[in-house]
Every structure is written in C-alpha cells, then in structure tokens.
Amino acid sequence: MHAFDILGDPVRRRLLELLAEGERPAGELVDIISAEFGISQPAVSQHLKVLRENGFTTVRADGRRRIYAVDAEPLQAVDEWLAHFRGFWTQHLDALGTEIARGKR
C-alpha cells in the first residue's frame, strides 16, 4: 500500500495525530476514535492493523495491553517526497509574513 493511500483515510490520520502526542494503549485509541467517528472496536482495530503492517506504528505488549506509538520513518519518506513541492507555497508564506510585518508597523 502506498503511503498516501494510508494517509488518505481520516481515521488513520487521526490515529497518527493522537500517537504523535505519545504512546497510547489500543483501548484508549478505540475509545477516542469510536466517539469521534462512530465506528466499532473491530473497525478501529483494522485501521491500527493497516498502520502497523505498513510501518506507520509500532506496538508492544504491556501485560494484556497493546501500546501503540508512531514510527516516523514512513512519515519522513512522505516529507522527502513533499519537499519537491514546498517551493509552491513557501514564497506565498514568505509574502504573507512580509505583509503581516508591514501591518504591525
């Protein structure tokens, strides 16, 4: 599966956002995602499986709990690919910064 196929799903993006804040147990992720997206525990587990099998997350056992964390390597590859396109918006952001600075004078 291509990285953008994985990141194209809003549930998986939200899971990565939550995990970017730090490790979380699977049960906590299920509770949050179920509440926000109205999906079942098995559906959340499937999304976690996709992230894990494609290298976006790691999982470790802590007793009976499974603790998930972000694996940054695939995200670095996405960032490197996006670097080719940053020039399209960097100039606009620089110009915006200049206009904001002028407005503060």
Image (cartoon, helix red, strand yellow):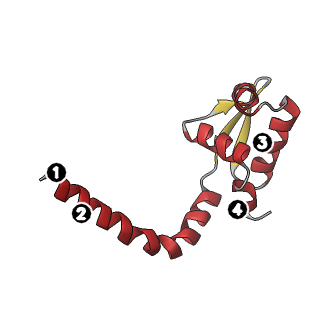
Quarter of the rendering occupied by the N terminus: bottom right
Q: Residues within 10 Å of mark 2 (few under 14, many from 20)?
A: few
Residues marked 3 and 4 touching at CB (< 8 Å) = no
Q: Name the residue that disc number 1 marks.
A: 104
Disc ID at residue 63: none
Asked which secondary structure carries label 1, the reply is helix
Q: Position of residue 60 (x, y in %)?
A: 73, 36
Reading the image, the residue beneath label 4 is 4
Q: In the rendered structure, are the residues bearing label 4 and label 2 in contact, judged by CB atoms less than 8 Å apart?
A: no
SS under mark 3: helix
Residue wearing tag 3: 48
Q: Give the mark nearer the N terminus: 4 vs 2.
A: 4
N-term-proximal mark, 3 vs 2: 3
Q: CA distance from mark 3 to mark 2?
A: 42 Å
Sequence-first tag of 2 and 1: 2
Q: What residue do we see at 24% from left, 56% from top? A: 100
Front position among marks 3 and 2: 2
Q: Secondary structure at mark 2?
A: helix
Label 1 is placed on what type of residue?
A: Lys
- Residue 96 position, x and y percent, is 31, 62
| Image-based side of 20 in relation to 8, left or right | left
Q: Mark 1 or mark 4: which comes first in sequence?
A: 4
Q: Nearer the viewer, mark 4 or mark 2?
A: 2
Near-viewer residue (89 or 68): 89
Residue placed under numbered mark 2 in the picture: 98
Q: CA distance from mark 1 to mark 3?
A: 46 Å
Camera-nearest label, 1 or 3: 1
The image shows residue 10 at horizontal and vertical percentages of 70, 46
User: What type is the residue that disc 3 sits on?
Assistant: Leu
Q: CA distance from mark 2 to mark 1?
A: 10 Å
